[in-house]
Every structure is written in C-alpha cells, then in structure tokens.
C-alpha cells in the first residue's frame, strides 16, 4: 500500500478515511498544512454491503 506525500511540504500524509467496502484508505490529510486530499471513490466497492454492518 502506497501513501502519498504532501505536494506542498513533502511529509507523509495521514490516513483520514477508509473505504467501507475493502478497508483501503481513500482519503488523506497532511498534518502540517492541514490539507485534505480528494476522496478516492472505489466504484467497485460502492455496491457491496459494508463489511462492518453484517448482522
Ligand atoms: Zn503539507
Ligand atoms: Zn474499496
């Protein structure tokens, strides 16, 4: 799994949000300049029920 680094200050981004379908990180935040990346939408996961809501 690759974590991008901030384009501005170059430090490693922190994971902010995980995909409900596959559990992969989909949104990151730079703690230094507090910039959020765009959320990556996994279209292949959107139609699957969330893993955590299996009852
Ligand atoms: Zn930054
Ligand atoms: Zn996913």
Image: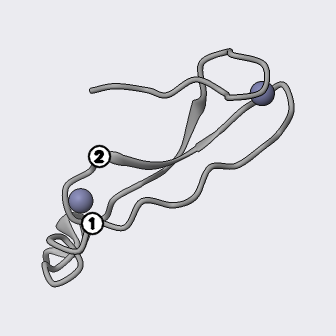
The residue singled out by tag 1 in the image is 42
Q: How are the colours assigned in the image?
A: one colour
Callout 2–callout 1 Cβ contact below 8 Å? yes
Q: Which mark is residue 30?
A: none
Which of these two is toward me, 31 or 38?
A: 38
Residue 28 vs 54, above or below: the answer is above
Q: Earlier in the sequence, mark 2 or mark 1?
A: 2
Ligand 1 location (quadrant): top right
Quadrant for residue 5, please give it: top right
Location of residue 15 in the rendering, given as x and y in whole percent from the top left corner:
53, 37
Mark in front: 2 vs 1: 1
Decide: is 11 above or below 45: above
The quadrant of the image that shows the C terminus is: bottom left
Residue at the spot of label 2: 24
Relative horizontal placement of residue 34, taking residue 1 as reference (left or right): right
Q: How far across and how far down the image is residue 51, in percent? A: 18, 65
3D distance between C-alphas at marks 2 and 1? 9 Å
Residue shown at 37% from the left, 67% from the top? 41
The residue lying at 30 percent from left, 65 percent from top is: 20
Instruction: Between residue 6 and residue 22, name the one nearer to us.
Output: 6
Left or right: 45, with 28 as reference point: left
């Amino acid at each position: 799994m690759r974590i991008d680094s901030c384009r501005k200050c170059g430090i490693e981004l922190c994971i902010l949000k995980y995909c409900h379908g596959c559990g992969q990180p989909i949104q990151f935040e730079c703690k230094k300049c507090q910039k959020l990346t765009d959320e990556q939408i996994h279209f292949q996961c959107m139609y699957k029920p969330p893993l955590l809501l299996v009852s």
